[in-house]
Image (tube, rainbow, N blue to C red):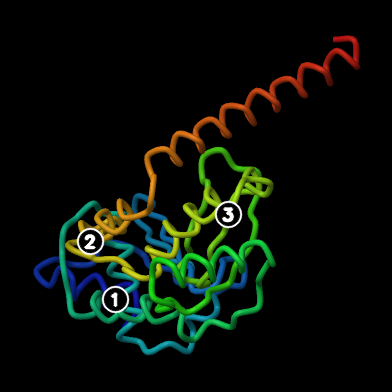
């Protein structure tokens, strides 16, 4: 039986599968990523090629997770638990090949001062000059990425951003009826333990405002240069 159809029928055993199903493995998606597309009579699932050799029961959990999201249903299965446990353990298997001296120093400081050196070092990288995603932790690649807006920020600010993302790696996530929660009560409590976190958040807001003004000024100067 097709993987998508089997996943659907295990989720909704009382229903017939009303779609044509198409499953594709490819290298276009990032590590262990997947997506789903729903058309009137067709469901297509794309999986990163790394999923090809993963246990079928785990892949059924992945497809069920995608189906719940696209069909806007609530459901919970043993296979979804298998999938979520697999995702939580991907960092253990992921090669650590990316690092940066400033980010690594920040990680080591935070790990020592606040987390008793309990967090294994992930991949560490600078991202783009993003105003929306200031920093992020990717479970699929075990990577903490920080916006280059903060490449010249003082140590306390970089450490605070690093701390937030390390908490994601430390606390992982909880999944219930098709929804994943990344900010549990325990996460929020730990986040408040960072010294002067409210003042630092205001400083971060000021940095963003200044950087935005600088971008707008540079654009205005560019158009002036062109005589427009």
Quadrant holding the C terminus: top right
Judged left or right of residue 212, residue 115 is left
Mark 2 to mark 3: distance in Å?
23 Å
224 and 8: which one is in front?
A: 224
Sequence-earlier tag: 1 or 3: 1
Residue 142 horizontal/vertical position (percent) = 50, 72
Looking at the image, is 74 positioned above or below residue 201? below
Relative image position of residue 130 (x, y in whole percent): 60, 42
Mark in the foreground, 1 or 2: 2
Q: Residue 108: name its quadrant.
A: bottom right
- Mark 3 residue element: strand
Residue underneath mark 2: 186
Q: How many marks?
A: 3
Neighbour tally class for label 1: few under 14, some 14-19, many 20 plus, Cα within 10 Å: many
Per the image, label 2 sits on a secondary structure element best described as helix
User: In the current view of this chain or complex, which residue is farthest to the top?
Assistant: 228
Query: Which residue lies under the disc numbered 3?
Result: 146
User: CA separation, marks 1 and 3?
Assistant: 31 Å
Question: Is residue 44 found left or right of 98 in the rendered image?
Answer: left
Q: Earlier in the sequence, mark 2 or mark 3?
A: 3
| Residue at the image position 29 percent from the left and 73 percent from the top | 5
Vertical relation: 133 (above or below) 224: below
Residue 143 at least partly seen: yes
Residue under label 1, please give it. Answer: 61
Depth order, front residue of 174/34: 174
Q: Quadrant of the N terminus?
A: bottom left
Q: Secondary structure at mark 1?
A: helix
């Amino acid at each position: 039986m097709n993987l998508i159809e089997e996943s659907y029928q295990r989720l909704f055993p009382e229903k017939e599968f009303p779609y044509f199903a198409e499953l594709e493995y490819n290298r276009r998606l990032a590590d262990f990523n997947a997506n789903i597309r729903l058309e009137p009579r067709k469901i297509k699932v794309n999986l990163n090629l790394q999923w090809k050799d993963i246990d079928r029961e785990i892949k059924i959990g992945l497809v069920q997770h995608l189906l719940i999201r696209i069909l806007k249903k609530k459901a919970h299965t043993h296979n979804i638990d298998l999938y979520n446990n697999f995702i939580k353990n991907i960092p253990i298997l992921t090669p650590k090949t990316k690092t940066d001296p400033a980010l690594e120093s920040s990680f080591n400081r935070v790990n020592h001062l606040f987390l008793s050196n309990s967090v294994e070092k992930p991949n560490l990288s600078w991202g783009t000059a993003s105003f929306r995603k200031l920093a992020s932790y990717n479970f699929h690649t075990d990577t903490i990425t920080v916006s280059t807006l903060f490449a010249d920020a003082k140590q306390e600010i970089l450490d605070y951003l690093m701390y937030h993302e390390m908490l994601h790696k430390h606390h992982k996530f909880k999944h219930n009826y098709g929804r994943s929660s990344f900010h549990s009560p325990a996460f929020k409590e730990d986040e408040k333990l960072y010294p002067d976190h409210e003042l630092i958040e205001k400083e971060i807001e000021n940095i963003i405002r200044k950087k935005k003004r600088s971008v707008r000024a540079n654009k205005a100067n560019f158009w002036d240069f062109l005589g427009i």
